[in-house]
Image (tube, rainbow, N blue to C red):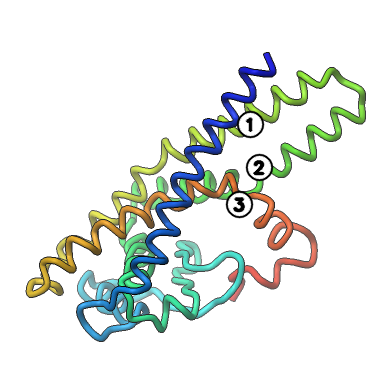
Amino acid sequence: MLVIFAIVIVLCIGVSRWSAGRFEQLIRQGGREQAPTAHTGREIAQLFFAFEGIDDVEIVEHNGVISDCFDPKRRRLFLSREVADGTTMAAWSIALHEAAHAGQVGEALGEFKWRQSVIRMSRYGPMFGVLGMIGMFLMRLPPRFAIAAFVALCVMFLLLNLGTLAIEFNANARLQRFLEKHLDRHPDALDRLNSHLSAVATREVGDLLRSPRYFFFSALPGTGRIRPVK
């Protein structure tokens, strides 16, 4: 039984590591590629908003554990300094992908909010699962019960994460008309940008591995100040 649990955990870690690796490659490779026009991440996001007629979103620079995200409740796009002021393909990819979520309204908005809930579960759930497993050990329950519960939680979080990825790719699809017009003279850059956008869309699948970081730096009492609360 323990062998089965170990195999399942290794598979979960493997999928999460694949996602994290894709995003890390985007940061390395895309961070060396200059964007085809001189716009920063903030400016290209503003151009997208103007193109789509979105005039109710505020772009806020925020550096913290949780940044580079769109808040649909407050209609704010939080960008780290590197992304907001960057003129690289990596900065563009992150800024544009998150800006595209502002165009998800109606039914798509409800799906996006559900996706955000799934992301939060993926970020914090595994560490709460570890605490629960420790509690079960302290209660002297059979170890297999504690391990089985933890494995089940990890699998559930990963499947929910993968199952809601379509919402992220829908955001990328909303960028295409704008990008085709803005980059009509840069077809190679458009192809590379679309590849980078795909890596941004799947980055939260790697949150399973980053759960301890999110837990200790943004979930515990006293750490709320480093979240985008403006």
Q: Position of residue 87 (x, y in %)?
A: 33, 81
Q: CA distance from mark 2 to mark 1?
A: 8 Å
Q: Secondary structure at mark 1?
A: helix
Tell me the quarter of the image containing the N terminus.
Answer: top right
Residue at the far top in the pictured view: 1
Mark drawn on residue 125: 2
* Residue 9 found in image quarter: top right
Q: Tell me if 47 is positioned left or right of 160 in this view.
A: left
Tell me the residue that label 3 is attached to: 210
Pointer 1 or 3: first along the chain: 1
Pointer 3 or 2: first along the chain: 2
Mark drawn on residue 201: none
Q: Position of residue 130 (x, y in %)?
A: 75, 38
Q: Is label 2 in contact with label 1 (beta carbons under 8 Å)?
A: yes
Residue at the far right in the pictured view: 139
Q: CA distance from mark 3 to mark 2?
A: 11 Å
Tell me the residue that label 1 is attached to: 153
Q: Residues within 10 Å of mark 3 (few under 14, many from 20)?
A: some
Q: Tell me if 218 is positioned left or right of 116 in this view.
A: right
Tell me the quarter of the image containing the C terminus.
Answer: bottom right
